[in-house]
Amino acid sequence: TLRLRMNLLQGFEYGFRARVVVPAETPVPNRWWLEQYRLTGDVAEPERAIAASGVNGFRTQQLEDCQLVAKNVVSEAWENPTRITFRTTEAVQTILSARQTAIQQAEFRVIAPEGFTYICPLSETKETILKRLASKSLYNSTDCAVNHEDLSERNKLY
């Protein structure tokens, strides 16, 4: 509840700033509400709703238009370059300190269904495919890691 210490006049635009912790995923429905209540002085109904207005919320950091294209689907195939493409809604960037050391490293986790195993390093994608998809390669700008010692973790690419 935001309690006002002054009356608001009709016909003026008002604004304020608030700190908000943004969730990892955009909620559904993604609406923000501003509601006006009035104290009634009645114990049974201490507040009465006067007006409410909803606005569309902003997108949080999420991935859209995700695609997964496998070269072959043969069981136990080691030569199976699988192309993964996606679009980000917000920048994914490493946060640096004043001394240029990483405070928070930009990273993704790609989780395949149980039974799949990722193999590092990443495979290079042909430039012609990237141009056709209007995509940028992450091949030369990523480090990848897979925990092969734990069977339940082999399907997770860090």
Image (spheres, rainbow, N blue to C red):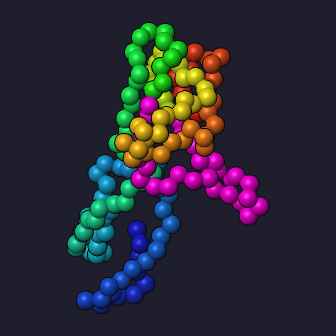
**Residue at the right extreme, as displayed:** 99
Q: Is residue 51 above or below residue 110?
A: below
Count of marks overlaid on the render:
0
**Residue at the top extreme, as displayed:** 75
How far across and how far down the image is residue 30, in percent? 31, 55
Q: State which quadrant residue 99 falls in.
A: bottom right
How far across and how far down the image is residue 129, in percent? 41, 37
Q: Is residue 9 above or below residue 111?
A: below
- Determine whether, in the image, residue 107 is placed left or right of residue 60: right
Q: Is residue 73 above or below residue 21?
A: above
For residue 6: magenta?
A: no
Residue toward you, 29 or 105 = 105
Q: State which quadrant residue 108 falls in.
A: top right
Identify the residue shown where x is 43% and y is 77%.
16
Q: Is residue 43 among what the camera can see?
A: no
Identify the residue shown where x is 48% and y is 62%.
20
How far across and how far down the image is residue 104, in percent? 64, 50
Residue toward you, 34 or 120 = 120
- Determine whether, in the image, residue 23 is placed left or right of residue 37: right
How far across and how far down the image is residue 13, in percent? 32, 85
Q: State which quadrant residue 69 falls in.
A: top left
Quarter of the image that includes the C terminus: top right
Quarter of the image that includes the N terminus: bottom left
Q: Is residue 13 among what the camera can see?
A: yes
Q: Which residues are magenta?
A: 83-109
Residue toward you, 52 or 23 = 23
**Residue at the front extreme, as displayed:** 128
For residue 89: magenta?
A: yes
Q: Is residue 33 above or below residue 141?
A: below
- Determine whether, in the image, residue 5 is placed left or right of residue 35: right
